[in-house]
Image (cartoon, grey):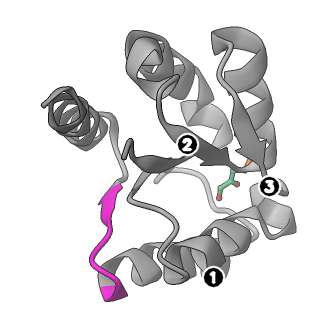
Amino acid sequence: MNPRIALIAHDKKKDDMIALATEYAAFLKQCTLVATGTTGGRLANEVGLTVDRKHSGPFGGDLQIGSLLVEGLIDAVIFLRDPMTPQPHEPDINALVRACDVHNVACATNLSSAHLVLSQLQSNAAQ
Ligand SMILES: O=C(CO)COP(=O)(O)O
């Protein structure tokens, strides 16, 4: 089964997310994707991905994705966080990353780790 991947990016990281998703578009089109609201909108419009869009992060989107993850419905999280900008929903962000640790779900929080996770998932899917 192709992986179920959550894609999330803070505002200053959204261009990076679009570039990353464009690079892996052929693979991501075979995956089941979920994203926070604004990230998901851009992924759909600019990369042509089919994405289950949740609420925007500050309105609970990270928590919605965390809930799916706790239910065992997410295989990996690509979460391009902005470490330089305070976020109003910091507790939600921490809750999602903590849920990844609790449930041993791969969570890439920067571009380098995102490339490693996506390229590994891609090669797993090709086998
Ligand atoms: O804030 C976010 C993650 O914490 C992302 O939300 P958006 O994709 O709606 O901008």
Judged left or right of residue 57, residue 65 is left
Q: Which residue is identified by label 3?
A: 54
Looking at the picture, does residue 1 appear above or below residue 97? above
Helix or strand or loop: what does disc 2 sit on? Answer: strand
Residue 106 lies in the magenta-colored region: yes
Above/below status of 25 relative to 7: above
Compared to 59, does 70 lie above or below? Answer: below
Marks 2 and 1 sit apart, C-alpha to C-alpha, by: 26 Å
Residue at 18% in and 37% down: 116
Magenta range: 102-107
- In the picture provided, is 106 more to the left or to the right than 45? left
For badge 3, the amino acid type reads: Lys
Picture quadrant where residue 62 is located:
bottom right
Instruction: Give the residue pinned by disc 2.
Output: 32
Q: Could you tell me how far apart the alpha carbons at marks 3 and 1 are, in whole angstroms?
A: 18 Å
Q: State whether residue 9 appears in this view.
A: no
Kindly report which numbered mark, 3 or 2, lies closer to the viewer in this rendering.
2
> Which residue corresponds to the image point at 34% horizontal and 43% vertical from the top-left?
110
Identify the mark nearer the N-term, 3 or 2.
2
Which label belongs to residue 91? 1
What amino acid type is highlighted by mark number 2? Thr
Looking at the image, which is closer to me, 85 or 17? Answer: 17
Q: Residues within 10 Å of mark 2 (few under 14, many from 20)?
A: some
